[in-house]
Amino acid sequence: MAEKTLKVLVVSAEREVWNGDAHQIMARTTEGEIGILPGHEPFLGVLAPCAVEVFAVDGNREVVAVDGGFISVEPGRHVSVLSEFAKLGHEITLEEAEKELYKAREELESAANEGFTNRDPELEVRYERASAQVRAARRHQEITG
Amino acid sequence: MAASLRELRQRRNSVSATKKITKAMELIAASRIIKAQQKAQASAPYSRELTRAVSAVATLSDVEHPLTTQIENPTRAAMLLITSDQGLAGPYSANVLKKGDQLVEFLDEKGLDIDAYVTGRKGIGYYQFRERPMLGTWEGFSQSPGYAEAREIAQTLLDAFMKPTDEGGVDEIHIVYTRYISRISQVPEVLRLLPLEVVEADEDDKPADPGEMHPLYGFEPEPEEVMDELLPLYISSRIHYCLLQSAASELASKQSAMKAATDNAQQLIESLTRQANQARQAQITQEISEIVGGANALADANAESE
């Protein structure tokens, strides 16, 4: 076990969101929660919309809202978290995320009421993105107090 | 003569006003190229990691995925044309459209029907004027495309690809975009987006070391499902890449077109100034000769009457 820390790279489609060293990463894949420690076996998992937590070596905890994407662990290289619209917890304003969540939920409900059997996937994506952002923003507030 | 002098001066003034405009457009385009390049660089890590992951899944598990399998007798292909929203960018849009027409011809010979999807007002206008059908159009972001737009386009194209062919689905997807090489050189190119050839190293990624082996991955969920998730992301990322390249190309093309326009205006101003000066001088000379002629005539008349 030569490696004591994880090199972490969090990227969204438009930019690099965060990179640095960390002790641990907590994420949720479509199968369930996963924690990744240094020396983890090679792994590739599909992320569920969630708040990924990165325990950085400097003691900070970074919360990243992801709307899907994936996490890949490659020994000797780095752990990469890819998500199209990844956002750091402190970049999200809770009110805005909540507003967006509320709007998306209303639209989903009105679509359901009108009796669309096949739900609009685009809308669901929006809803899940918003809910992940709300969760991340709340988590960020909990951590920083 | 006087009218011509005024005309020349008027023309000179209007040309110099135009020159100011083109100069400003040149500077704006130049500053935006830098931004476009930064955006392209910022999105590079994502596509690099994504390509790595896709190739890891593809090489480690023998996943037969509908997005990577070549259909034996393709009958219908989709073409995505990436053009600009604004004109005044030199031959930028015209080149893409020309390349698109070549692609249509090529696919036509192979017996494929073409569905056209167009981004950018210039391309849309071109197709509308010729009354060619378009199945999807997008506009308003040609100079600074975001990922959300790329995703929307990818979704539309994927839907078309996944539909069975006899219901109007397509078997192949091609993108016509403009590759940005440098500020002076941008080349329109055709890229086959689907079916994917994931095994081949991409030209914009560093070629993987031949000796480098992918480690044995644990997959969660199953590799097939991971592939299902990854490939649409990969496609969105490719489209995003093409949009960014095209945006940088459009701006570079605009900059050089505006630079040429500014230089032309400067030349025109110089020659008009010369003509105006000549006209003014000619007018003065004529006036003097008229005065001298008049004075002589008077002197002659006086001499005769004495």
Image: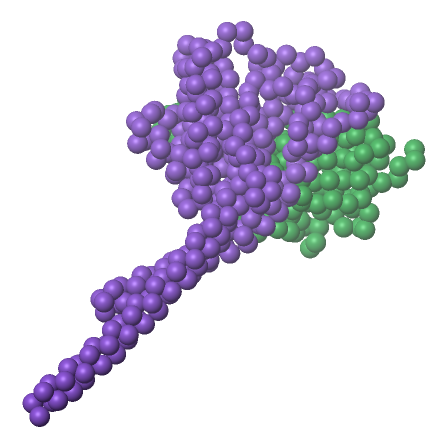
Chain colours: A green, B purple
Q: Residue at x 46, y 58 (%)?
A: B24
Residue at far left of view: B305
Residue B63 locus on image (x, y percent): 67, 13
Q: Nearer the viewer, residue B191 or B306?
A: B306
Total numbered labels placed on residues in the image: 0
Q: Residue B285: which quarter of the image?
A: bottom left
Rendered-image quadrant of the C terminus of chain B:
bottom left
Residue at far top of view: B72
Residue B251: tell me if it is visible. Answer: no
Residue B33 locus on image (x, y percent): 56, 48
Residue at far right of view: A2
Q: Residue at x 92, y 35 (%)?
A: A2
Q: Nearer the viewer, residue B257 or B49?
A: B257
Rendered-image quadrant of the N terminus of chain B:
bottom left
Left or right of B228 in this view: B281:
left
Q: Nearer the viewer, residue A23 or B46?
A: B46
Residue B166 locus on image (x, y percent): 41, 10
Q: Nearer the viewer, residue A3 or B155?
A: B155
Q: Residue at x 65, y 21 (%)?
A: B198
Residue B270: tell me if it is visible. Answer: yes
Left or right of A26 in this view: B265:
left
